[in-house]
Image (tube, grey):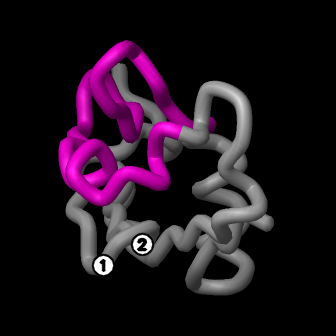
Amino acid sequence: MPTHYQVTEVRPTAHLALHVKFYDGLAGDVEFEETHLYGVFEVLKNPHFFSKVHCQHGYVEWPGKLDIAPDAMYEEIKKHGNWVLR
């Protein structure tokens, strides 16, 4: 059974910005600051790669099984309407 943390929709709204919707209907925006993108996440600086975002099995994902934590994203969006990764 799905949990409220599961992402059902994701779409890029700009480079380094996403709009997400969760199983329970909560929706909001996610923004990445370039300073947060290092290590495995550095590839997200590439606009073409970033645009390949998709939702699979309740996660926001990119090719290569790169994903972000749905529970942390949900909690920040629930509190603030958005999640800025700094």
Q: Is residue 27 above or below residue 68?
A: below
In which quadrant is the C terminus drawn? bottom right
Q: Position of residue 84 (x, y in %)?
A: 68, 73
Residue at (75%, 56%) from the top-left corner?
36
The residue positioned 59% from the left and 66% from the top of the image is 32
Type of the residue with mark 2: Ala
Looking at the picture, tell me which residue is in the foreground, 15 or 6: 15
Counting from the top left corner in percent of width and height, residue 8 is at: 25, 46
CB atoms at circles 1 and 2 under 8 Å apart? yes
The magenta-colored residue range is 43-69
Q: CA distance from mark 1 to mark 2?
A: 5 Å
Measuring from the top left, give residue 44's x and y in whole percent.
46, 47
Kindly identify which residue carries mark 2.
17
Q: Is 24 on the left-hand or right-hand side of 29?
A: left
Q: Residues within 10 Å of mark 2 (few under 14, many from 20)?
A: some
Residue 64 lies, with reference to residue 20, above or below; the image says above
How crowded is the residue under tag 1: few (<14 C-alpha within 10 Å), some, or many (20+)?
Answer: few
Circle 1 sits on which residue? Answer: 14
